[in-house]
Amino acid sequence: MSEDETRRLEELWTRFVARESLAKEERATLAAALERDEPLRRRMIGDLQLDGALRAAGDIEHGQEDVVAAVTALVTAAGKTEEVVAAVRRRLEEKARAAARSPAVLARRGGRTARFVAAAVLLAGGAAALALLLPGRDDARTLAPMTAENEPAAPLVPPEGAEGDRRSPAPARMGSTTAAGPGPRATVARLEVIEGRAYQHGADGRQRAAPALALAAGDWVSISGPTARARLAGPGGSRVDLAGEVVAGLAGDPAQPEGARLFLAHGRATATVPPSAARGPILVLASPHAIISGAGTVHLEVGTAVTRVEVRAGRARVSALGVQHATEIQAGQFTLVRADDLQPPRAQATPRLALLLVGPDDTKEGPPPAQGLRGSEERLKARLERLGFQVDVVDAGALSPDRARAAALMVLSPSVSSNRLDLRFAELPVPMLVLESTGFEQLGLTGARWKRDLGSAPPLSEIVIEDPAHPLAAGLSGTVKVLATPLNLRWAAPPASASLIARYAGAPDQAGLLFGYERGAATALGIAAARRVGLFLGNGRVIRALTEQGWRLFDAAVLWCAGG
Amino acid sequence: MERPRSEPTEASQLERARRGQVDAFAELVRAHHPSVRVFLAAHLRDSAAIDDLVQDVFLRAFDRLGTLRDGTAFRAWLLGIARNRLLEHLRERLRSGLPAPDALELLLDRTQLAILEGDDEESRRGLELEALRQCIRRLPPVGARLIREHYFKGRPITALAAEERKNEGALRMTLLRLREALRECVRRRVGAANES
């Protein structure tokens, strides 16, 4: 290899290791060279390993306690997941015993009786599928739903089996009422893990779910982590997207062999159910509070005491477990369901559009997947959606002013190459939330002089609220812990026309970590055409370390910024 | 021979952790997390995957504490779990093709997998963090400062290049040379330690 070639390859390699974006041809050149030149390959792999070790050593300096806390929580929660599954199972068993003692509940009475089969599989031998039935019109009996408010007083106990042994005997087949050994497992759905950790709880206890996992009736799945996502491909072309912390169980439908039931014990799910020519809906959903059937797209959020049901397309029939009527929800409507209360449907307000701008810059969290967002950007997106925005993710380099003007808010991820932003961005009459200091400079939120207008703060996890009365303070005051672990942040010193909301202890004068401009205020570049906010979330590592108070400040920044 | 001062403490933590005491296990995590993370990060670029695997390793270790016979070999045992978990992860990634890799990612994954499967002492042990720290201290002051500013304080290359009055490409090359020097230094130190 000539010297020029070596220099070229080294140049490409160092950009690759520095997490810079390489063009497709550049990556192909690098791959071809490494493939054919073994000494070069060994040398570069060694370099990559040392780069990784150095990055890890840097992470360790700042993230040690975070990891210890996370692992401790996981070790504790690993037992809790099994406890949740076992506790739900026990509640359904109790209902089955209660239902079996009252056969009148099963009979039709006068008017229509809705019948619903919800499933749970016992992880010990001798299990039976359960029928959870809505009472008929004349039946005053109400079934106690499974909520934390009326959980049995007895403490949760670990599942059966030797201490520390998470394996359990095979479950009985769904629909059987007698003890049965394990039989062939009929697939009810397939699980695709898109991001994060997913676990299957079935015949062999708990195991990590791999993509394209076949699930049988009686299996439970859980996903964990704020950016965890998985998709269940169900019968008849139905699909359920799970997001965040979710626990869900699957069952067959004895009344309709082609169908299935999904019980969402906790978390968020969006189900798309096609119309079915069969006797009933191909997929029926349930939560501890509600039963939902229909065709279309339904979004569920199941909490401790309430389930939110939003119909995004089609229509759904929603019943509360303890209420003797159902209600029809149409597209664009939602309802809140408690165990004993079913509210009338309300119109879902048209969500405001937020543009999340992303780019190629390193956010200190590794390159994004080919078809996805960085973990920090997934969290930003999820948080914006939680605040009621419809979020479009846009490459900052490809955004046209016209498209930007249609948005209620623009949020610039730290991955945006701010020094390559079109200067017209600064003049757009669109509220902007800017998270990274080169963006502050480029968009006129601050001047450009290092150590006068911008600078590095020492590693910190707490900030000091200077203006607690301002909406940007999110109702916080004094010293607030915003990061789980001390991290390096950048401070900014905006002109006096900005409202300085938060600093850090010992900061230079006017050096802030959170500040905002009203529309019409003078900025470092001119006049703010809409509200502008600068917030200290300068890279993905910081975003991922945010505490709940840190996220409150983000929420407040979004809502105040978008409000003007 | 006098036993090292830390041994009795770790032995008692292990014993308590075996009995299910999570706080004792947390101390073991605190002590050994750096080694596990450095080991994994030397083979993976995705910090989310590294975080994931670090947690998996310790979860597995907690589940399997009962199988650890020699308490004095806890770190080596832990790195063995990390190595196996990493092998599973790389194999799964290559098999599933998710996320869709290009030729460069595929080549790097295959090469890393081959190194791990080679099962030599160096691949089992991984890069020694303490040796790395000592080697950083032995770098010339300018080099040590660059390594600390970039890797430990997270300062981007653009900012460092401006301070050093170099273009970014030249600074990246400087970092490459520094990394190579560190690698050689670590190799010599670990080799010397094994011989003594």
Image (cartoon, coloured by chain):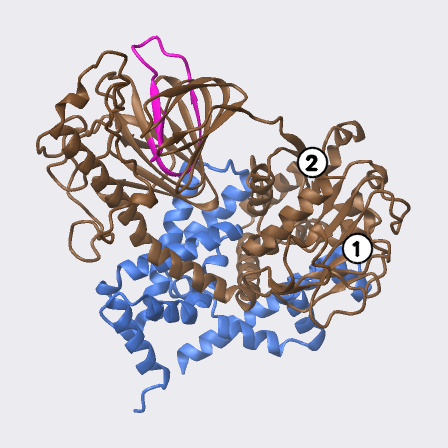
Chain colours: A brown, B blue
- Residue A478 position, x and y percent, is 65, 65
In front of the other: A474 or B161:
A474
Task: Determine which of the numbered discs, if any, sits on residue A476 in the image.
Answer: none
Find disc 1 in the rendering and name its residue.
Answer: A499
Task: Determine which of the numbered discs, if any, sits on residue A395 in the image.
Answer: 2
Q: Residue at 45% across / 58% down in the picture?
A: B40
- Whether A45 is among the magenta residues is no
Q: Pointer 2: residues within 10 angstroms few (<14), some, or many (20+)?
A: some
Q: Residue at 27% across / 48% down in the picture?
A: A82
How many marks the image carries: the answer is 2
Q: Is residue B70 visible?
A: yes
- Whether A285 is among the magenta residues is yes
Quadrant hosting residue B65:
bottom left
Could you tell whether B146 is left or right of A45 in the image?
A: right
Disc 1 or 2, which lies upstream in sequence?
2
- Residue A444 position, x and y percent, is 84, 49
Q: Which residues are magenta?
A: A263-291
